[in-house]
Image: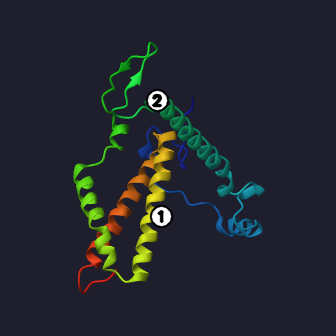
C-alpha cells in the first residue's frame, strides 16, 4: 500500500497534513446547470425513474403487509372468542344434565346492564304516558315515532348479537341505541314541564 502525496510531492502520513480545501481547476456549475436544464422536470440524471416513483412499489407492499397482518389478527381473535352461551344460561352436557354456567367474561359483561340505568329507565317509562299526554299532538306523534324506531333498532341489534355475540360493532351500536332511548325519555320528561318544549 502506498501513501498519498500532497501537492508539493511529500508523503502524507496523517490527515492533518492534508490541505483543508482544494479549489477545482475550473468552475463546474455552468456544466451542471446545462445538464439539469436538458432533463425533464422531476427526472433524475440519465433518464431514470423519478425518486418519487421508485418508492411506490414499497408503499404498496407495506400497505398489503399491514392489511394481511390485520386480517390475520382478526382471524386469530375470532377463533379465540368464547362460545355463544350467555351469563346464567345453563349448558346441557351430553348426558342431559345441567352444567353450571362459567364465570362471566369481559365479553359477557357487555350484556349486563347497570342497576341504576334499569331503575332510571323504569321510572321514565312509567311516567312516559302522562308526560306524552301533556305534549301537543305533533310533538307527541314525533316522540312516539322516535321511541318506536329506537325499540325496533334495539330488537334488531339484540337478535343480531344473539347470532354473533362477539361482534364489537353490534355491541357499540346497541349501547348507542340505549343511550338514544334514554336521551329521548329524558327530553320528554323535561319538555313536559311547564314553560319548556322539545
Residue 11 appears in the figure: no
| Whole-number angstrom distance, CA of label 1 to CA of label 2 | 35 Å
Q: Which residue is nearer to you in this view: 84 or 56?
A: 84
Q: Secondary structure at mark 1?
A: helix
Res. 149 mark: 1
Res. 8 mark: none
Residue 101 quadrant: top left
Please state the horizontal and vertical placement of residue 196, each as a whole percent of the image: 27, 84
Q: Circle 2 is placed at which residue position?
A: 80
Please state the horizontal and vertical placement of residue 8, each as a whole percent of the image: 53, 48
Q: Earlier in the sequence, mark 1 or mark 2?
A: 2
Instruction: Give the number of callouts.
Output: 2
Quadrant for the N terminus in the image: top right
- Residue occupying the point 45% across, 30% down: 83
Q: Which residue is nearer to you in this view: 156 or 31?
A: 156
- Residue occupying the point 60% across, 60% down: 24
- Residue occupying the point 31% across, 33% down: 104
Q: Which residue is nearer to you in this view: 38 or 151?
A: 151
Number of other residues with Cα within 10 Å of mark 1, as a class: few under 14, some 14 to 19, many 20 or more: few
- Residue occupying the point 27% across, 72% down: 189
Residue 99 quadrant: top left
Horizontal relation, residue 42 to residue 89: left or right? right
Horizontal relation, residue 76 to residue 16: left or right? right
- Residue 191's place in the image compared with 195, above or below, is above
Q: Are marks 1 and 2 in contact (CB under 8 Å)?
A: no
Amino acid at each position: 500500500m502506498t501513501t498519498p502525496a500532497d501537492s508539493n510531492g511529500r508523503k502524507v502520513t496523517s490527515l492533518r497534513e492534508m490541505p483543508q480545501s482544494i479549489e477545482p481547476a475550473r468552475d463546474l456549475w455552468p456544466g451542471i446547470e446545462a445538464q439539469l436544464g436538458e432533463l425533464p422536470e422531476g427526472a433524475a440524471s440519465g433518464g431514470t425513474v423519478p425518486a418519487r416513483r421508485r418508492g411506490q412499489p414499497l408503499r404498496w407492499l407495506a400497505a398489503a403487509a399491514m392489511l394481511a397482518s390485520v386480517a390475520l389478527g382478526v382471524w386469530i381473535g375470532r377463533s379465540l372468542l368464547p362460545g355463544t352461551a350467555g351469563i346464567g344460561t345453563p349448558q346441557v352436557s351430553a348426558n342431559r344434565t345441567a352444567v353450571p354456567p362459567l364465570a362471566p367474561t369481559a365479553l359477557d359483561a357487555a350484556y349486563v346492564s347497570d342497576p341504576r340505568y334499569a331503575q332510571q329507565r323504569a321510572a321514565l317509562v312509567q311516567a312516559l304516558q302522562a308526560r306524552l299526554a301533556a305534549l301537543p299532538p305533533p310533538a307527541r306523534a314525533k316522540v312516539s315515532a322516535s321511541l318506536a324506531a329506537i325499540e325496533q333498532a334495539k330488537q334488531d341489534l339484540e337478535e343480531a348479537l344473539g347470532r354473533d355475540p362477539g361482534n364489537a360493532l353490534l355491541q357499540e351500536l346497541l349501547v348507542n341505541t340505549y343511550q338514544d332511548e334514554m336521551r329521548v325519555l329524558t327530553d320528554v320528561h323535561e319538555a313536559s314541564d311547564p314553560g319548556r318544549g322539545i
